[in-house]
Amino acid sequence: MRIPIIAGNWKMNKTRDEALRFIYEVNRAMPDVSEVETAIFAQSVHLRCLVKRQGDNLKIGSQNVHYEESGAFTGEVSPIALKELGVTYALIGHSERRSYYNETDESVNKKIHKALRHTLRPIVCVGEVLSERESGKTFEVVERQTRLALEGLTSEQMDEVVIAYEPVWAIGTGKTATPKMANETCSDIRNIVEKLFSKEVADKVRIQYGGSVNTGNIKELMSMEHIDGALVGGASLDELSFIELVNVAKEA
Ligand code: PGA
């Protein structure tokens, strides 16, 4: 049995006050962590005050982490500094970082290794763009991204890794992959993990779906065998919507 994990990716949204109000409201509505795990990925500037108020379940994550511990990397965020703040998760390889900030399969891999070294739990994003989906290259793309992202990890380290399958064409567009389509690719990713590690690792790893997840489609997505949660952008900004997503995941 894999415990579902619902994570909100706030991207570059929310003032400090809005963020604090959300955490205050949502914390007390969260179920036990043995039922659904929850996390919020906030802008770096808010991490400190959010971590101070995180609950037993709702944990805080950074939207990025650098693969070096320190040095001349203006504007980047060090894994040591994140750990020092008490941050639990690091989002790695989100498609917006891949497309706007030159995140590559190689840097994604280095970041995962460094995050794990500092006991930050990586949520690693993979997914195809529309032209790749339309030309039948989805498997090829997620196979490459998954294989290169996880290169050099041990089976024990995989216990800490969550994979998010996010078809890029479904992010922020209102177009969701059909639950069947999402499940097929999540199943492919699980098979890739099995080839790279073992059946045991593949059975355990949590694979989220992301891309226009909302309160109207979460139920069907969560009913799919290989979908173990969601990485949610837009619909995670509203307190009631986030609580509902978590409650649906709990019942799934
Ligand atoms: P969305 O974003 O839910 O707004 O499509 C998902 C994501 O970028 O992780």
Image (cartoon, helix red, strand yellow):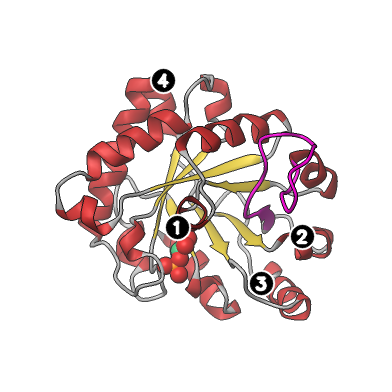
Q: Residue at x 57, y 79 (%)?
A: 238
Residue at image mark 4:
197
Q: Earlier in the sequence, mark 4 or mark 3?
A: 3
Residue type indicated by callout 4: Phe
Q: Nearer the viewer, mark 1 or mark 2?
A: 2
Measure how far apart labels 4 and 3 are at the Cα level: 36 Å
**Residue occupying image coordinates x 66% and y 45%:** 65
Q: Compared to 209, does 49 lie above or below?
A: below
Query: Mark 2, mark 4: which one is toward the viewer?
Result: 2
| In contact (CB < 8 Å): disc 2 and disc 3 | no
Look at the numbered disc 3 and give the secondary structure of its residue: helix
Q: Is residue 149 above or below residue 178?
A: above
Q: Horizontal placement of 25 versus 103: left or right?
A: right
Ligand 1's quadrant: bottom left
Q: Quadrant of residue 59?
A: bottom right
Identity of the residue drawn at 46% across and 36% down = 105
Helix, strand, or loop for circle 2?
Answer: helix
Q: 25 or 33, which is in the foreground? A: 25
Q: Which residue is mark 2?
A: 47
Per the image, the residue denoted by label 1 is 230
Front position among marks 4 and 3:
4
